[in-house]
Image (cartoon, rainbow, N blue to C red):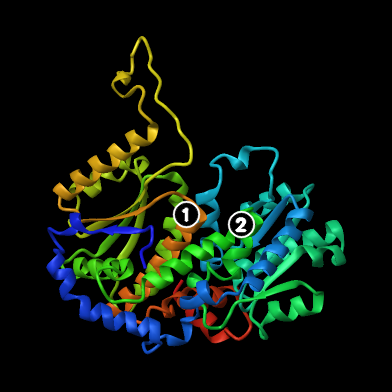
Amino acid sequence: MKTNINVNIAQAAAVAPESAVKALLPEAADALAKVDNGTGAGNDFLGWTDLPTHTTQAELEDIIATARSLQKDCEYVVCIGIGGSYLGAKAVIEALSDSFAAYRIDYTNPKVIFAGQNIGEDYLFELRNLLADKKFGIIVISKSGTTTEPAIAFRILKEQLEQRVGKEEASRRIVAITDAKRGALRQLATEEGYKTFVIDDNVGGRFSVLSPVGLLPIAVAGYDIMALMAGAAEMQLATKEATLENPAVVYAATRNALYRAGKKIEILVNYNPKLHFLAEWWKQLYGESEGKDGKGIFPAAVDFSTDLHSMGQWIQDGERTIFETVISVDAPEHETIVPTDNDNLDGLNYIAGKRVDEVNKMAEIGTRIAHVDGGVPNIRITIPALREQYLGQLIYFFEKACGISGYMLEVNPFDQPGVEAYKRNMFALLGKPGYEAETAAIRAKI
């Protein structure tokens, strides 16, 4: 099945020619089979693979009905979560939103804002001040309910909401997305009567955007989750065969060919500022999935042409351990023309009458040529527009390619053992019960 996402590897050919990519097809085919058949390491976290086609109409309608209830009662909805529990929703909402929605007084739908993704005291203080005289609700996302960052934010904001509207009304404005049976948040939700959605045990956080974790905040923001899931389902069907017609296979095999040729850093590039948080989501997806066992391509991201004025020099002339993956959006949603100026003091009359996007596209083409000439291989991913269907395709494409690529690297793409180290140290330093031995050991180091 064809999709609207195109992956072009022609400008990576100096380092990863098509012959090298084809040579990796047997490895890619084996990796794809591990993802699709659940025969590889971490196969208990593959529930994300069929979310687009197995999520029922009734389940989506329940999410939409819950979103409408929050829309009716709230001016703001605070989505509390960290990592994959917020980045996917943030990425889609930012990609689809008016760039200046935060500065507008009237909202057709509640403004979705985020908390629990940091431990910033000023951030939480200022958020409480913002909400002090506002009608707000909470979506809290945590399998356990005890992850430090979101748990702190939820404790603070839950108290504020209950003090403002009372426990009974607060319980109607709080939605918990959590484990089906276990954990502190599940217990609290049952006791308080919160509306709940389940994070399935076999769906890891960074692969959860196409579950209620991402779908509910996206729906609250007013976007079409049916179209998002339909696009993802199209990509699910398009990534079944281990051929060069499969965009996920092409991307995974090419980036592994580049890695084996010494390109250790992948820079995800966009030329549309609405894609900034899509890149942040991508960084977590690939960094947490591949960076282990002393292996992994380091994921970085830049917003062009903005970052050409800060990172362009390093990319053009720095150490040649990098390659770029460029996300290019074919068509913007709006049209703006560069006007003519009679004085022409800025010298821009040569582009008068052109659309701003044409100028942007020429900047993209010129930059890609310059970087390739400078020894930076380029992969180009194009999508038609920033709309729900195409974002659904792009999200599933990156997820599927991540699983394939991780197995090609011979790591478990679905665990994250290194993430726990900082948590143990933090708990010890804070004197958490049960960490007495660790507290003594770590205090001896400081």
Query: Circle 1 sits on which residue?
Result: 277
Image quadrant where residue 144 sits: bottom right
Q: Residues within 10 Å of mark 2 (few under 14, many from 20)?
A: many
Residue found 59% across the figure and 57% down from its top: 224
Q: Is residue 182 among what the camera can see?
A: yes
Disc 1 vs disc 2: which is toward the camera?
1
Is 396 positioned to the left or the right of 196 in the image?
A: left
Front residue (pair 122, 417): 417
Which of the labelled discs sits on residue 163, or is there none? none
Quadrant where the N terminus sits is: bottom left
The image quarter containing residue 69 is bottom right
Q: Position of residue 72 (x, y in %)?
A: 77, 54
Q: Is residue 257 left or right of residue 65?
A: left
Where is residue 215 shown, x and y percent of the image?
Answer: 59, 64
- Dot 1 falls on a residue whose secondary structure is helix
Residue 42's x, y, as percent?
42, 85
